Image: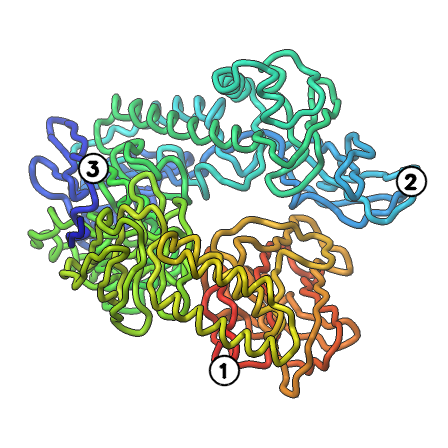
Amino acid sequence: MIASLLVASLITLQEGPAGTWMGQHWSVNVAHTLLWEGEPYTPVGAAVLGTPEAVQAIASKGVKDLHLLLDWEQNWADAVAAAERNGCRYVVSLSSPMPTAPGWVCSAERLRIVNVSYRGRVEVPIEGASRVFYVVAGPGGSVTASGWATLADGRAAVDVNLNVAGEDYIVYFYPWKQQTDLPDYWDGLDALRDRLLLRAKDAKFGPGLRGLLNPFGKTAAYTPQEAGVVPDSVAFRLEFEQYLRQKYSTVDGLARAWQINVLSFRDFDEAARLIPLFSRYTGVDGFFDPASESVLSARREGSKYWDDLQTLVESSAVRRAKRLAEALKSVVNVPVLFEWAGWSSLHERRNIPGEGIGIPSVGSGVDAILGATGYAASSALAWGARGWLIAPEIRFADSGAPFPSETQLRSALTTLVDLGVKAWYIRATSDEEVAWIRQLNQEAATDATLVNRSARAIFYPINARFPADTMQLPGGVWWLPTPAAGDRIDLGTRFEAYRLAAPYDNHIAMWSVGGPRRTRLLVPNPGSLTIHSVSGAALDLKVEKDGVTLTLPSEPVLIFGAETTPVPEDSIAELTESEKALTAEAVRRGADITEERFLFADGLRKAKTSPGAALAQMQDAIRRMTLKVSPYVWREGERPTDTNYGFRIQSGGCSQGAALRMVTGLPLPAAGMRATYRIESRGSRDEHTIWVAAKVPKEVRPFVRVEFKGGASYPLGTLPMAEYGDGYGWYQVGKVSLPRGTYEVSLVVAPEAVAPDISVDVLLLTPQAFRPSGPRMPAFLDGTG
């Protein structure tokens, strides 16, 4: 069946929660609006410090809707009394940091020193560690020595004294810290809950209270994916033991899943205390048992340890958040909200903890949604989660600078309104902002459309950023990123597409580049497809025997029910044109592309019966032909000839789905961090332009260079173009003459860089003009790339 439906009908919203506070009934409707005594509460207010002086000052200027930022050092009762005395309506939040879990930091990629001599002393700064276990590993990752480092003045020292000579050993450090980057959902949270409940009772909240935000406190991430922390507490180990027992039933099953070579423990409680000597990316093949101070042999590759630990942390976070919200509501029955803090299990679900989500907002207009605001809105809207949506602390800049004009503040609020936010609190730092808040609050109070206005959105996997991007599409529909599974689909230069495979949605999005284009989508069993236009406009399409003919617009259409990728006939024609040109060039150069031509022809024969598989096969053949005859050099970043800190990572948004990551949290050696690539130039009369596709933090870019062995050195540059995927972009580095021959090119991070973390997708040297287009290779002989 082919249909065209409004996107709004694709998003399911649940009825919201309800309660009663001091005789006042409240509820949250399906449009995320808080109704208080049946009336919509849509305030434009101010976020202020939770002191009686700050409350009195802002209230005296006529702003009576407040977000009070409270910490443990303040007297909550005094601030609350000031708010009630001035007739304020207020949300309160805990702005103190969330307690973090004590434990072992097993971030092997960040805590290592490479190219260590078999004899000598290694000393590194490791702040906050109570003790540090170390391992000296050989080139293959095997353990050659281990023990406890000497700690003094925040530095850990290891004396390496091995029998086998060598200069390529690696020393890994595993510190135990009282404070880590992982929130404490175990012993620390019990203490937090008791303290919070007592403070809530003593605060004497009055009828002006409208909500409680961040009962955990502030955190950078609820469930950080790369913290590399193994918590060390009795409560954690008991919970981990129970999880492992339920999942694996037998210790033998666990040992197989964790790739432990020799079973040296008898029960799950012993397994729960093991510390991995590897991260998800690199490290030593083994586990450390703190009780026996022994190392167990294991294989890092294929181990499910970190998957198990992350699952446990995420389930603990959700369970404890729900329990804390319920406990608070037994004392203060108002909505409890958790502010979005990175992709996490708290908000990537339909049944969120509490009764709402805080949406961060920094900046003005559409630019503000490109980061955390857009991510948070995606989490709130994609799952159809019920709850009140608020922007608790709207700022113009991280520096605290005020909004320069009322127009820019209005732009920020308009964007948030369009995203479905229903309460807006500005961190006002000027009298002008206070005056604007008063005016905007009056306007919101009389805007009857706010109460039932719902945001409309479609979602793209963040791996598919470029061609997709965060923006508002025709019809007011938002295009927002999601961490859900999915990838970009390469359809050539005339069309773009991606596939989303989320628990809440599964579709292919496709659109035309450069204006509407009539085409025929090759797909078996076309009658099984359902196709929606994003804007709700009718689609001019015709169902045929082995495809669908339609006009693809410039905005995405959503295709449901496709078992294989529908492929535009134009994409097949474009590949066929490329194959002819490449074949002619191969003949001219005397290059052997017999195998590639066979693969291409085989794929072309299958285009109507298996279009998705045929497209991939034909593209692979074209890629291999291009690399054999093209005048440019294209090197995959994840395939260096040599690297001291680099390791391969999977990244769906990158060329060939992978990149080379180079990272450390320790000082770099004098040679810095580098990846070297040996390249072959076919020679050209024209200079080659050097391009690097990489993900490089802004603060690291000044320390990155491209160096030719025995030749020139070029700074990376500070502004990438054509950004794509999860933070990748193209850097135009410079120009170089490349006569025919072999060269060594290195991407180098200078030793002055602090904690660098970069990922390299592609190194390209081309005499052709090149226009970056995500991770796509330049088209052969088209003069533009």
Work out whether mark 3 precedes mark 2 in sequence or the reverse, and give the earlier one.
2
Identified by mark 1, the residue type is Gly
Determine which residue is flagged by label 2.
164
Q: Which image quadrant for residue 154?
A: top right
* Separation (CA) of disc 1 from disc 2: 55 Å
Q: Which of marks 3 and 2 is in front?
A: 2
Image position of 242 with respect to 419: above or below: above
Determine which residue is flagged by label 3.
210
User: How many C-alpha atoms fall within 10 Å of the one at disc 1: few (<14), some, or many (≥20)?
Assistant: few
* Separation (CA) of disc 1 from disc 3: 62 Å
Out of 447 and 626, give the one closest to the viewer: 626
Residue visible at 52% across and 53% down?
657
Badge 1 marks a residue whose secondary structure is loop
Out of 198 and 166, give the one closest to the viewer: 166
Image position of 249 with respect to 596: above or below: above
114 displayed left or right of 408 = right
Determine which residue is flagged by label 1.
783
* Separation (CA) of disc 3 from disc 2: 69 Å
Badge 2 marks a residue whose secondary structure is loop
Badge 3 marks a residue whose secondary structure is strand
- Which coloring applies here? rainbow
